[in-house]
Image (cartoon, helix red, strand yellow):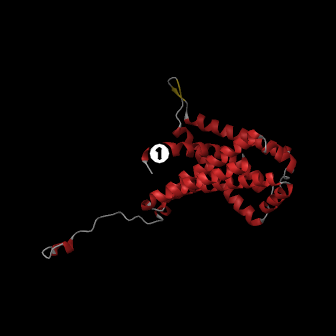
Amino acid sequence: MNKSNDPFWWTLFGAGGAMAAMLVPILLFLAGVATPLGWIEAPSYASISAVMMHPIARIAAFSLISLSFFHWAHRFRFTLYDGLQLKHLFQLIAVVCYGGAFAGSLFAAWVLL
Amino acid sequence: MDSSSDYSLHHPKWHRDQKPIFWWIRRWVYICFIAREMTSVAVAYSAVLLVLLYRALQSGPEAYTELMACLSHPAMIVINVFALLAVLYHSITWFNLSPKAMVVRLGRWRVPDLMIAGGNYAAWFVISAVITWAYLAG
């Protein structure tokens, strides 16, 4: 991985980190914790579809998903590199992380768009 | 290597710092650092959940009901509580660091760190309130 690529990956990392910081906690709290515990009622299929399937919502959700994957790829890559001292696997780790994010984004695009 | 180089037996070994894999467990700040980096796993996991939700919504009402039933499984609730704690840690560390990554100047005046972080928290609150309202309206 060429050093000069770093600003590009860092931009994706930063955009994903910011978007996830704003949106993910409340979404996960509502759908993953509050609803399953019965604190609030699950929205009906018709109403949640109406909101989530709107083209603007789908584009926003796709951006959030894809950038979240690239955010993960960048952070996880350097955690393996520095944290686990896997410096000799530098290239392999980068390919697996960014490749995984790319594959996940393609799949998300296929589902959402 | 020729036979006269007996002294090469005493060639000094290269000095290399051998850091143990779990070097970061020795100090609390390092543990916090690794924990912060690992929140990215929870962020990616949440993104996967969102893809699954879209898949279910496109398959129809039965798939949606099935997914919500799956999310109600005790193991899933435990996983999601941990993931929620992780993404909250991500948000808080992100907003607190943002003034350091992004220095805003208005003319000669540098916008204080507290105002940038505060703006982030205010936006976070408003966005969360709007999403909650939309969710409950359903």
Q: Nearer the viewer, residue B25 or B3?
A: B3
Q: Is residue B125 visible?
A: yes
The residue sitting at the top extreme is B107
In the image, taking residue A54 as reference, residue A85 lies left or right, namely left
* Residue wearing tag 1: A5
The residue sitting at the left extreme is B4
Coordinates of residue A8 in the picture (x, y in percent) = 51, 43
**What residue is rendered at 20% in x and 74% in y?**
B9
Coordinates of residue B35 in the picture (x, y in percent) = 57, 57
**What residue is rendered at 46% in x and 65% in y?**
B21
**What residue is rendered at 85% in x and 58% in y?**
B62
Q: How many marks?
A: 1
**Figure check: B10 above or below A23:** below
Mark 1 closeness class: few <14, some 14–19, many ≥20 residues within 10 Å:
few
**Figure check: A88 above or below A68:** below
In the image, taking residue B96 as reference, residue B53 lies left or right, namely right
Coordinates of residue A10 in the picture (x, y in percent) = 52, 45
The residue sitting at the front extreme is A110
Q: Is residue B84 visible?
A: no
Amino acid type at circle 1 is Asn
Q: Which quadrant would the C terminus of chain A be assigned to in this image? A: top right
Q: Nearer the viewer, residue A8 or B112?
A: A8
Q: Nearer the viewer, residue A57 or A85?
A: A57
SS type, badge 1: helix
Coordinates of residue B17 in the picture (x, y in percent) = 35, 63
**Figure check: B29 above or below B102:** below
Q: Residue under mark 1: which chain is it in?
A: A
**What residue is rendered at 75% in x and 61% in y?**
B77
